[in-house]
Amino acid sequence: MYRDILSLSKGLVGTVYEREYFVGANTPILFGYASIFYRINTWFRFRKIASLIRRFGGKGNTLDVGCALGHSLVRFESIGLKPVGCDISAWATKRARKIHPHINIIRANALALPFRSGAFDTVTAFETLEHCSDLNLALREIRRVIKPKGLVIASVPTTNLNRTYDDETHLWHKSLREWLTLFESHFRILSVDFFMKFMKYVDGKTCNTFITLRTRKD
């Protein structure tokens, strides 16, 4: 869920996507990835994700790109998937490994995924792509590491339904139509679904837009 920086040696990742970004500077109970409301929201949100996985036959080895603290990974396990997580943040991956020591979680850049081609049956990227400096490269990497006919589920903020400019780490501010045009250049679109966030009552953000994709022949 985090801005990808091609050179990690510059130290920018540590200043942007470390503890404060995830926990929240002022009200960690209400805000941040470890907050009560975030956990409630992700529990309900995962019901939507699980329904999409069942509907379109998601299975097997599953990579979550931008896994943050790994909340989705343990839920993937609960529905029979074999999850692997990666995130650009050193703080998040270290914390996620402590929370889920039995799950493989690594620090990795979405623009250069350290996995062999065709390693995964399913790939997810929830609120991640808008932080990537090169969208086409990120999508090519997802396509590279997924098997033929593999399933991809991405969620993105859209200017139609979200105040995307509120988050200064967002590098892209696209309408739903613009996102779909981008995805269509790499994948076959299976469905577009929406989830009204419980968190909208706290942070004013309204909706997750889930786009389910299938790898296609060139």
Image (cartoon, rainbow, N blue to C red):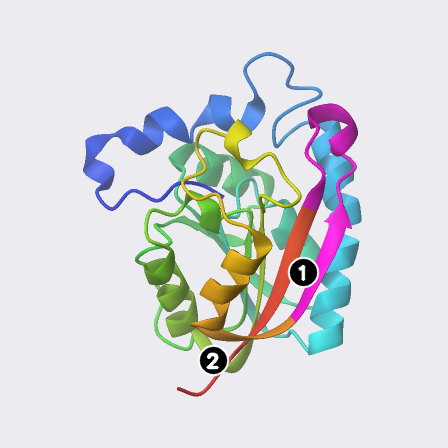
For residue 77, which quarter of the picture? bottom right
Report if residue 197 lies within the magenta region. Answer: yes
Above or below 116: residue 48: above
For residue 143, which quarter of the picture? bottom left
Is 40 on the left or on the right of 190, as rendered? right
For residue 41, which quarter of the picture? top right
Amino acid type assigned to the residue bearing label 2 in the image: Lys
Q: Which residues are magenta?
A: 191-207
Is 59 on the left or on the right of 93, as rendered? right
Q: Quadrant of the C terminus?
A: bottom left
x and y percentages locating residue 39 in the rendered image: 72, 36
Q: CA distance from mark 1 to mark 2?
A: 20 Å
Assign a secondary structure to mark 1: helix
Badge 1 density bin: few <14, some 14–19, many ≥20, Cα 10 Å: few
Residue sitting at 45 percent across and 63 percent down?
Answer: 182
Give the number of marks.
Answer: 2
Assign a secondary structure to mark 2: strand
Is 151 on the left or on the right of 113, as rendered? right
x and y percentages locating residue 84 in the rendered image: 51, 59
The residue beneath circle 1 is 77
Q: Is residue 217 or residue 8 the one in the foreground?
A: 217
x and y percentages locating residue 148 in the rendered image: 48, 84
| Res 147 label | 2
Report if residue 156 lies within the magenta region. Answer: no
Amino acid type assigned to the residue bearing label 1 in the image: Glu
